[in-house]
Structure formats: C-alpha cells, structure tokens
Amino acid sequence: GLDGTGVKVAVMDTGIDIDNPDFGGNGSNHSTSFPTARVVTGWDFVGDAYNADSSSASYNPTPTPDNNPDDCAGHGTHVAGIIGANDPGAPGNPLKGVAPKVSFGAYRVFGCAGSTTDDVMLAAMERALADHMQVLNMSIGSAFDWPQSPTAQAASRLVDRGMVVVASA
C-alpha cells in the first residue's frame, strides 16, 4: 500500500527529463516549465557542454549552471523512472516505478556526455539537504575510493542528518 506519497527523492545524476509525462511534463520537448508537478525542485550545476574527463575530446571543465535540471543524456531520467515513474495514461499498460507518487528533486551533475568532479557533487548534495530531500539517489561511486572519498564522507554526514542515501558504489 505504500506509493511514495509525501516522500521527496533527490536524483543526483544527469537531470530528469521534465517534458516526460511520467514526471509531470507535457510530452513535447523543451516546452514544459520547470518545476513540474513531480520534479518540484532541483538545479543544473554544470550545463550541457560540461565534461570533466580530461582524456575526452569533448573535455570542458567549466560549469555553466542554470536553474533547469533537464536531462540531455537519459540516465537520470531512467533512474527516476525506476524510482517513481507514473504514467497512468499508457493504454493497457500503465508505467509505474517503485514509488509512483514521490516528488523529485533533480540535481544535474553531468553534462550531456562525460564525467564530473567531487566539488560539483558536493554542491549538489548540499543543495539536496537545503531543499529538505528525504532520500538521495547517487548513481555515482566506485568501490576503490569508498568510504574515504569526499562524496562518501558527505553521504555519511547526510545520513547522520536523517537523509537516506543510496549509492551505486
């Protein structure tokens, strides 16, 4: 009987496609105003062109933040769908995530391609706390630097402050 009602989930990833009807959008690209009925808060910390991977041909370590965490890479939208997609209008096959009535915070820490840095992720984690998110999903991490990495230390501090943190590490 649990459906996520009243729960605020932060997705720290590539953003969330705010035009997607599963998250309160109208289904038409670049036409939905942010925030939506489901993606109620968030921030784009990096912009589309950002890529912290210095070995990449598209290396661009200069963030250009803005207030719209719309997804151009797809991974954050995929993750948000598992968590709480809700498309009751899909004929004969309604699409639902695990908790279809959660509210989302989208914290975009990746550009359209490439990598990110600890300082960007830490800023997103701080913002999620300030926005009173109850759960933080970070599809970010690697076993070789956990638990001593800055993001792991910050995750522990968020847990100490009452936030549930889920990491892919």
Image (cartoon, helix red, strand yellow):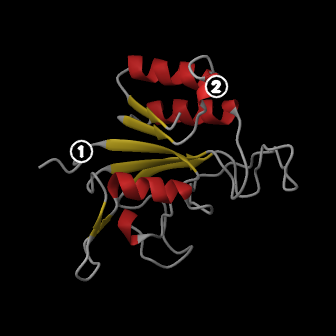
- Residue drawn at the location 51% of the way across and 63% of the way down: 17
Above/below status of 58 relative to 136? below
Residue 133 seen from this side: no
- Residue drawn at the location 73% of the way across and 51% of the way down: 114
Question: How many numbered marks, from 0 up?
Answer: 2
Which element type, helix, strand or loop, lies under badge 2? helix
Residue 58 shown left or right of residue 84 in the figure: right
Which element type, helix, strand or loop, lies under badge 1? loop
Residue 9 seen from this side: yes
Residue 108 coordinates in the image, percent (x, y): 59, 48
* Amino acid at circle 2: Phe
In terms of sequence position, does the residue under pointer 1 or pointer 2 come before the other? 1
- Within 10 angstroms of label 2, few (less than 14), some, or many (20 or more) residues? few
Q: Which residue is mark 1?
A: 6
Q: Residue furthest bottom?
A: 91
- Residue drawn at the location 86% of the way across and 45% of the way down: 55
Q: Which residue is mark 2?
A: 144
- Residue drawn at the location 28% of the way across and 52% of the way down: 98
Residue 119 coordinates in the image, percent (x, y): 68, 30
Residue 111 coordinates in the image, percent (x, y): 69, 53
Above/below status of 116 relative to 74? above
* Amino acid at circle 1: Gly
Q: Quarter-wise, where is residue 109 in the image?
A: top right
Residue 152 shown left or right of residue 160 in the figure: right
Q: Quarter-wise, where is residue 20 in the image?
A: bottom left
Residue 33 coordinates in the image, percent (x, y): 49, 66
